[in-house]
Image (tube, rainbow, N blue to C red):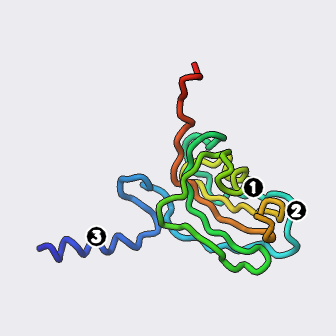
Amino acid sequence: MSVLCAIPLLAACGNASSNSPGPYAGMDLERPVVHPPSGPAPNYLVVQDLRIGSGRPAHWDDRVGIWYIGADYRSGAEWYHRWRKAPLTFRLGSESISRGLERGIDGMKLGGRREIILPVKFAYGSGPLDYVVQLMKLEPEPETATKH
């Protein structure tokens, strides 16, 4: 009996989207492939929504959690990813990550996915970078005693 019960659970592990209750219910969980555009790298921040998401947009001082994939703009070689792992969580505007990446995340909605291209000045000085980011967690700025 326990073997039969395990089979449906294993089959559900490979789904690209989550239909079960939980923190990622209804979100697309499929890992994207980063395809940097052709041509010269931009010298300005580029933000393009791939999926809008739902709810209110993220703003400075909100606590956010993201999944992301980073790739070199010129070669397309993936240099780092955090996908289908615990989201990277930080306060938006705290400069815990690249300032350009924070600017690209500002305004995203929960479950939304964006491509964010960082020019050299925002890319840790290592050349232009291309990210695909998905907003997995959004908590409003905590109320403090000084606010009324």
Please give left or right for residue 95 compared with residue 109 in the image: right
Q: Which residue is mark 3?
A: 9
- The residue carrying pointer 2 sits among few (fewer than 14), some (14 to 19) or many (20 or more) residues within 10 Å by Cα, namely few
**What residue is drawn where x is 62% and y is 43%?**
58
Q: Which residue is mark 2?
A: 43
User: Of callouts 3 and 2, which one flags the residue occurring earlier in the amino acid sequence?
Assistant: 3
Q: Secondary structure at mark 2?
A: loop
Q: Which residue is mark 1?
A: 100
Place of residue 81 in the rendered image (x, y in percent of width and height, measured from the top left): 59, 70
Question: The residue tagged with tag 1: helix, strand or loop?
Answer: helix
Q: Quadrant of the C terminus?
A: top right
Q: Earlier in the sequence, mark 1 or mark 2?
A: 2
Q: How far apart, in angstroms, are the residues tagged by discs 3 and 1?
A: 40 Å
Q: Secondary structure at mark 3?
A: helix
Query: Which amino acid type is marked by label 3?
Result: Leu
Q: Residue at x 55, y 38 (%)?
A: 140
Q: Residue at x 22, y 73 (%)?
A: 6
In primary-sequence order, the first of circles 3 and 1 is 3
**Residue at the outermost top position:** 148
Q: Picture coordinates of residue 55 (x, y %)?
A: 55, 42
Residue 45: image quadrant is bottom right
How far apart in space, not on screen, are marks 3 and 2 (Cα)? 47 Å
> What is the C-alpha distance between the residues marked 1 and 2?
12 Å
